Image (tube, rainbow, N blue to C red):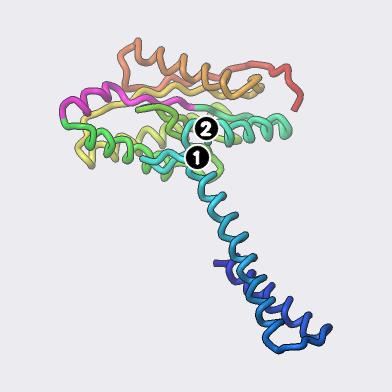
Amino acid sequence: MAGTALSFLCAFLWGAVELSTHVFSHPGIPVWNAVVRLGFFLIVTHSLSAMAVMQEWVRSDYLTGLANKRGFYEFANNELHRARRRSSSFTLAYIDIDNFKRVNDKWGHSAGDSVLQLFGTILRGATRRSDVVARIGGDEFAVLLSDTNYDSSARALEKLRDALNRGLKEHNWAVTFSTGAATFQNWPNSIDAALDQADRLMYEIKALGKDAVMHRAVTVRSTQNA
């Protein structure tokens, strides 16, 4: 809408300048020129808008509306560089739905989709706008809590867990979830390294019986420059 309005304004101003600085052999010539330029402006505006929408689709998960794995890496890498510059800590949580295959096998894939959508809605609603929330696999989610130390992230993770348990109970979904979370006060070399730490903690919980949170402070000094 803003681009369309700007296109009309530019075409009008261009036409006004032409009328004030040139003498035309026919009064329809400046009108025609303004219409042609308006068409050009509108084509450029809508092309740029379409490109922006396509880029957003590429970074978004079609089912939950969260960032997908590609979007997560893009946003998370930005956060990693920012944390290095500001010498701030952050927490990365890896969440896996326990026995998700049973939901699809028992109630069908539409039921599984509903569970995933519910997870996405709850995770986004229980986090800050500055946090990164993504679906990075079939039933796997990642949450990057920016500017959090161990204590503040522990409270945030408890809030997430309570919100998920409450939502699952309200919708009568008998599923649980396992969470591995790593708080980095020194910075890993990459988001892959951070995600691997959280993934390892999540699998520790899986091995211990699932349906819990494994949260640790991790000290890894990056060798890269900020």
Residue 104 inside the magenta-drawn segment: yes
Give the mark toward the camera: 2 or 1. 1
Q: For label 2, count other residues whose C-alpha is less than 10 Å away and answer few (under 14), some (14-19) or many (20+).
A: some
Relative to 124, residue 174 above or below: above
Question: In terms of depth relative to the viewer, which is nearer, 100 or 53?
Answer: 53
Residue 152, x across and y down, in percent = 53, 33
Position of the N terminus, as image quadrant, is bottom right
Residue 37 location, quadrant: bottom right
Relative to 77, residue 188 above or below: above
Residue 19 location, quadrant: bottom right
Residue 204 inside the magenta-drawn segment: no
Task: Give the numbered dot on residue 70.
Answer: 2
Q: Residue at x 64, y 30 (%)?
A: 80
Q: For label 1, count other residues whose C-alpha is less than 10 Å away and answer few (under 14), some (14-19) or many (20+).
A: some
Relative to 35, residue 52 above or below: above
Residue 28, x across and y down, in percent = 67, 86
Left or right position of 109 against 194 = left
Q: Residue at x 40, y 24 (%)?
A: 179
Magenta stretch?
93-106
Position of the C terminus, as image quadrant, is top right
Question: In terms of depth relative to the viewer, which is nearer, 98 or 6?
Answer: 6
Circle 1 SS class = helix
Task: Give the numbered dot on residue 179.
Answer: none
What residue is pinned by disc 1? Answer: 58
Circle 2 SS class = helix
